[in-house]
Image (cartoon, grey):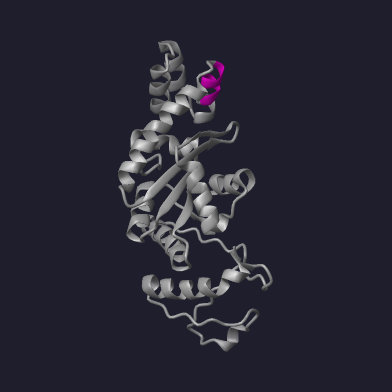
Amino acid sequence: MVKAEHVNPFILSVCKVVKDVCKMDLKIGKPGVKKEEYPDDASIIELGIVGGLSVLGTTGIVEPMSEKALTDTIWLEMKMLKETGYDRCYVVPGNYGMDFLRKKLHVDTALSVKCSNYVGETIEDAKLLGMKGILLIGHIGKFIKLAAGVMNTHSRQADCRMEVLGVHAAMNDADAAVVREIMDCINTTEAMEILRREELIEPVMKSVMKRIEFFIKNRAGEELEIGMILFSTEDGILGKSENADELLMKIQENG
């Protein structure tokens, strides 16, 4: 969604980015314009605008299939934010993250970029575009992998969820039987139940966050401020980087 007061710079940015990336020249028509007023070979793009303008196709969602299409979409979304004057944004993997932004953090989801599994590529995009900061916000089931330095979180690339939780449980004095139980879990929800039973969630998440911070800051370098909020559906926020609250405020003020 785009707020009405942002529509002019947003549309201009869309036109510029589409021309740069897709090699297409766009013409802007009025809401409700009839298709026959355009040439037969024209491409019609409808934008969802809220706040005093007609709403056109607000449920239109593109589901790109190829890896290149996904990474190009990430670049495009972030570039549109940059072109419209936003140099900090939220980065979420998908709908879980978007729902958490909206329902738990109560922030403007228009200032977010969906990164899917491509955390590393998204960080590189942010640096190349000259963004000042990004705040990663994700479910433990996906972003726990960042604690092992895995920057492509798709399961076919790497699945170290139980290994990470098992190691950090052991680091916080879990016995061998508990670690084996964690290793036998199918998903992080099951593993978190074990950590909860053993009263290990807080210390484990603390050490996990230290490793996540190490890896994402190493990837971001000095030119990009980066932070992290890790959550689960059952427990809410599990861990935050030291700069998460400050970066959250900067993004809100920027918006």
Q: Is residue 60 left or right of residue 81?
A: right
Q: Quadrant of residue 152?
A: top left
Task: Name the main secondary structure of what is drawn in magenta.
Answer: helix
Place of residue 134 in the rendered image (x, y in percent of width and height, measured from the top left): 43, 51
Place of residue 239 in the rendered image (x, y in percent of width and height, measured from the top left): 49, 33
Does any portion of residue 161 appear in the rendered image?
A: no
Q: How many marks?
A: 0
Residue depicted at x 47% and y 22%: 203
Does any portion of residue 133 appear in the rendered image?
A: yes
Q: Is residue 43 above or below residue 129?
A: below
Residue depicted at x 49% and y 76%: 12
Q: Is residue 143 above or below residue 22?
A: above
Residue depicted at x 46% and y 75%: 15
- Quick one: quadrant of the N terminus? bottom right
Q: Is residue 32 above or below residue 96?
A: below
Q: Is residue 216 above or below residue 255?
A: above
220, 154: nearer the viewer = 220
Was residue 1 drawn as part of the magenta stretch in this picture?
A: no
Q: Quadrant of residue 22?
A: bottom left
Q: Is residue 221 left or right of residue 84?
A: left
244, 92: nearer the viewer = 244
What is the span of residues highlighted in magenta in the rendered image? Answer: 192-197
255, 45: nearer the viewer = 255
Q: Is residue 88 left or right of residue 156?
A: right
Q: Quadrant of residue 59?
A: bottom right
Place of residue 74 in the rendered image (x, y in percent of width and height, measured from the top left): 42, 58
Residue depicted at x 54% and y 17%: 199
- Quick one: quadrant of the C terminus? bottom right
Place of residue 133 in the rendered image (x, y in percent of width and height, measured from the top left): 42, 52
